[in-house]
Image: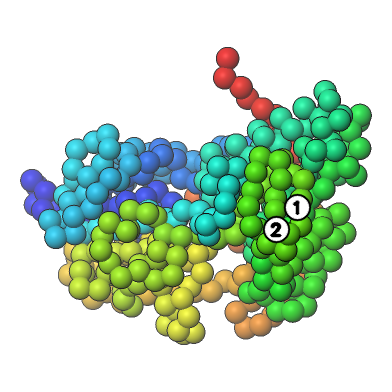
Amino acid sequence: MTANGRPRVLILGGGFAGVGAAQKLEHADAEVVLVDRHDYHTFQPLLYQLATGLLETTAVGHSLRDLLSRHENTVVHKARVTAIDLDQRTVEFDEIGPISYDYLVFALGAEVNFFGTAGAPDHAFPMYTLPHAVHLKDHLLERWEAVDRDPSLLADGALNVVVVGGGPTGVETAGALAELYRGDFATDYPNVDPEDARVTLVEAGPELFGMFKPKLRDYAEKALTKRDVEVKTGAAVASVTPTTVELKSGETLKAHTLVWGAGLQGNTIVQSLELELQRGNRIGVGPDLTLPGRSEVFVVGDIAAITDSKTEQVLPQLGSVALQSGEHAGKTIADRIADKEPKPFKYKDKGTMATIGRGAAVVQMLGGRTMTGFKAQAAWGAVHLALLPTNEDRAKAVVDWVGAAATHQRAGRITVERS
């Protein structure tokens, strides 16, 4: 308990799960402390649009303090977690003192999993954080500028991109890159033939979009091929250098850019907790999302292995799962403080969806209904607008999307260098 007798709720992580928990605790009789290594919330599903210039940084990242400014019981700190003592109920950080808690919401998210691929940690471009997306955008622009100055770099694969992963992240990124290359960059750099720039999507499994029905998989591959994306299924990456990607088949692809969208693993801090972890360093939780044997600790978001009560399958690492699990944790804590009976977590599946490019998207609803094309893209847009944290963010996204659809231009394709 704090000095004023109110319980302290410590939320680790300002992603979908952490913010969802904080929002449900706004009116709780508690002291809420949210700590994240950044001072902003990242809207991860749209990172690829930032990387390809369709959206600007402020449409994808939003100040955590701004999001929670009306929460009189909440404070936000920017710091990195260094140690967690579950027995003593304290957490240590790098730049602030230890914080004790009565309730802990463990929402630190996941980290990129390179699956031991040689060279990938040093040379690949992941797509999980805001800095990742900005770094990729700046790199792409730098490569095109370099080729514009020295066309001989084309032969070395300076403009070629290999995207690893046939899930939504990989497919959406590959489609957006192809449209950026064939559209805006073709206009921006008239001395460079965009046909000489290859975008290749590599998937280790036999098909793209393994979570979708076969007809949606076929649609996605045809939509990518129509955008001049070369699709290689059944192909795994063996190693990466700054200028090449070697496949396990022995084929070597010349490419100065490798975008990694192949997998995630739980935040590495979980390895210090001496817990039994599930595949991908994820922590198993009970029906109420608490850590087994510790009713005061809630594990939510990408770091949690949450079993769907209906399908008995572990839920995927999606923004909607993270948000709903975080909201459930926050509401459950608020109910406990108010002496109300909490309920088990029930995930509301709003369907699985992905956009491939302008006018091309796929949607698969829980009941099996599917959509493709413009209708699917409209549904995708509506769901993602609903997930955005503020009306200001929604307005920014709509303006950028409508502008891009009308003019086929991406306003965010500039590089801002430090002087």
In the image, taking residue 174 as reference, residue 11 lies left or right, namely: left
Q: Secondary structure at mark 1?
A: strand
Q: Nearer the viewer, residue 103 or 314?
A: 314
Residue at the image position 49 percent from the left and 84 percent from the top:
311
| Residue under pointer 2 | 247
Query: Residue 356, image x and y in percent?
Result: 75, 59
Mark 2 crowdedness (10 Å alpha carbons): few <14, some 14-19, many ≥20 = some
- Looking at the rendered structure, the kind of residue marked 1 is Thr
| Residue under pointer 1 | 252
Q: Nearer the viewer, residue 225 or 9?
A: 225
Marks 2 and 1 in Cβ contact (< 8 Å): yes
Residue at the image position 14 percent from the left and 60 percent from the top:
87
Q: On residue 36, which mark appears?
A: none
**Disc 2 versus disc 1: distance between alpha carbons?**
6 Å
Q: Nearer the viewer, residue 104 or 98?
A: 98
Q: What number of labels is visible?
A: 2
Mark 1 crowdedness (10 Å alpha carbons): few <14, some 14-19, many ≥20 = some
Query: Residue 201, image x and y in percent?
Result: 74, 57
In the image, taking residue 274 as reference, residue 302 lies left or right, namely: right
- Looking at the rendered structure, the kind of residue marked 2 is Leu
Q: Is residue 411 above or below residue 381?
A: above
Residue at the image position 45 percent from the left and 65 percent from the top:
280
Q: Earlier in the sequence, mark 2 or mark 1?
A: 2
User: Can residue 315 be seen here?
Assistant: yes
Query: Residue 388, image x and y in percent?
Result: 54, 52
Q: Secondary structure at mark 2?
A: strand
